[in-house]
Amino acid sequence: MQMKNNNASLIAISKIISKNDRVNAEKILKGWNFKINSDKNMNFKYLRYAGSPIQRAEQLNNAYRNSNIIFSIMGGMGAIHLFEHLDFEPIKNSDSILIGYSDITMLLNFLNQEFGKRCLHGPNLGKPLKEFDKKTINCLFDAINKKNYNVNFNDKDILIKGRSRGKICGGNLALIQRSLATPYEIDTHNKIIFMEAVDKDPQWVFDTLWQLKLAGKFDNIKGVILGHFTECGKDIDKYLKEFFKDFKCPGIMHQPIGHEEPNLTVPIGEQCIIDTDKRFWGIKFN
């Protein structure tokens, strides 16, 4: 893997991680020839989280001060606690790239839309490298190195036909919902939104999409990309198709994003194209 700068930090800002989780992540980065900045704050525990809100926020603060690239080890819950304790000055002045998915969805979208930071919705590194699909890793490094890429899909994946282009935002559906009515609410205006979910029943997904609709999050969007809806019930497609049936923007489903392999990286804020005639969506870097 090629990187112009290989100074990296690992963060655990959600649920408690095990020693194996950290060892797996460190082994992966060493194999990719990264120099790793360790943070003592990862060794703390607070309730079921990897440290108190202040300790976990300080992990991210330090990572932005000391590294060019920041990898999340694990998702879970708890990243929402950090916002009140973040030091936004070093973040604003940093060129670091933040990478992860699931629980850090709010952080990825807010730091990009508020400060223009490079934030990649990509793999957490807390599992052995052999458990990652090759497409996951290749796409991660394409995104890091700003290499354009396209993803092909089939007729059965089309929700709404059309062609569109716009900045992309989104992530885990539960975290998009959690951002509502906060100062860190996701901005979807004139954007393509992507969503994925895990371990939710179809009714929860359907009602949450309705909540986002009532909150105006689907007003004036340019497109919809639905990723993995892992362990969301055998009827999940029926609920998704029913919800999006009257949308006018192009939409696709069954895309390799989220809590299964492959989990392709989506760079928040970059230009995305959806073309259902040519059966592809893709990322175009500035």
Image (spheres, grey):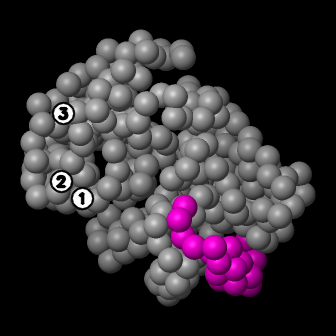
* Residue that mark 2 sits on: 49
* Residue that mark 1 sits on: 78
Q: Is residue 74 above or below residue 258?
A: above
Q: Which class describes the residues within 10 Å of circle 2: few (<14), some (14-19), or many (20+)? A: many
Q: Is residue 260 above or below residue 200?
A: above
The answer to whether residue 123 is visible is yes
Q: Is residue 195 shown in magenta? A: no
Disc 3 residue type?
Answer: Asn
Question: Mark 2 and 1 residues: CB-CB less than 8 Å, in contact?
Answer: yes
* Residue that mark 3 sits on: 62
Which contiguous range is marked in magenta?
230-249
Relative side of 11 to 122, left or right: left
Relative side of 116 to 161, left or right: left
Q: Give the quarter of the figure containing the N terminus.
A: top right
Disc 2 residue type?
Answer: Tyr
Residue 172, horizontal then vertical, whole percent: 46, 61
Disc 1 residue type?
Answer: Gly
Give me the residue at 57% from left, 73% from top: 233
The answer to whether residue 95 is visible is no
The foreground one among 231 and 25 is: 231
